[in-house]
Amino acid sequence: MSPPTSPDSSVEPAPARAALALRLALLAGLALAIAAGLYVFGTEHTPDYSGTALFGRTATDTLPLKSWLATGLLALAAAQLGLGLWMYGRLPGVRAARAPIPNVHRAVGLAALLLTLPIAYHCAFAYGVQTTVDSRIAIHSLAGCFFYGAFAAKVTIVRSRRFPGWTLPVAGGALVVLVAVLWYTSALWYFNNYTLPFL
């Protein structure tokens, strides 16, 4: 007969692990379903400039404004990353932030989301999702689809509070990376005379 073991709080019972696995699977399913829905819409939609006059009537007309808006979005994403690290005490030599920094973090996040909407609207309706033209456009199209899935996952994690602590930085980090990829494959390409380093 083996000696009794002391309870270890670091080891979750099987039902709790199964419930967590189910929540993580549903979260991943939500993100992938949104990305897939945007992908299907973008591939099935016939590109049309007629409803996107805000950015101009031709591809060349759209590039300056969209590139500057994307650069503003990148700056907001960097601010979000810094505020998030500050809130959770992850900045070297800096204590965790107190009020009102969490509210500022939420406000910057909302501003970033709102800034994505006209850009995404134009991309979706004027271009659609294109994966066969060249690698830059394919990467940009796929990152755009995954962005909103990652955003939905992050909001779900924040509102649920039933996920492990590592899920929030993973979702937030994925959003920042996707914004950087979107900027790299669009605004940087425009600012760099229609060429991209390393691609």
Image (spheres, rainbow, N blue to C red):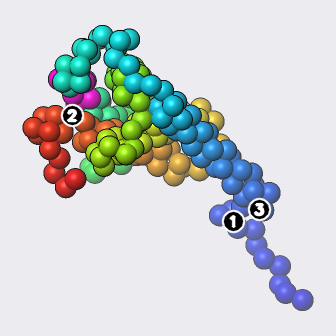
Q: Is residue 147 left or right of residue 6?
A: left
Q: Is residue 15 left or right of residue 193?
A: right
Q: Which residue is mark 2?
A: 187
Q: Is residue 147 left or right of residue 198?
A: right
> Image point 42% across, 35% down: which residue?
129
What is the x, y in percent for residue 13? 77, 62
What is the x, y in percent for residue 105? 39, 29
> Image point 69% across, 65% down: which residue?
11
Nearest to the observer: residue 87 or residue 119: 119
Q: Amino acid at mark 1?
A: Val
Q: Where is 185 relative to 99, above or below?
A: below
Chain part drawn in magenta: 64-71
- Sequence order check: which comes first, mark 3 or mark 2? 3
Q: Main secondary structure of the magenta part?
A: helix
Q: Amino acid at mark 3?
A: Pro
The image quarter containing residue 161 is top right
Is residue 8 one of those drawn in magenta?
A: no
What is the x, y in percent for residue 35? 52, 38
Q: Closer to the camera: disc 1 or disc 2?
A: 2
- Sequence order check: which comes first, mark 1 or mark 2? 1
Q: Secondary structure at mark 1?
A: loop
Q: Could you tell me if the residues under marks 3 and 1 are in contact, i.e. CB atoms within 8 Å?
A: yes
Q: Seen from this angle, which residue lies furthest right? A: 1
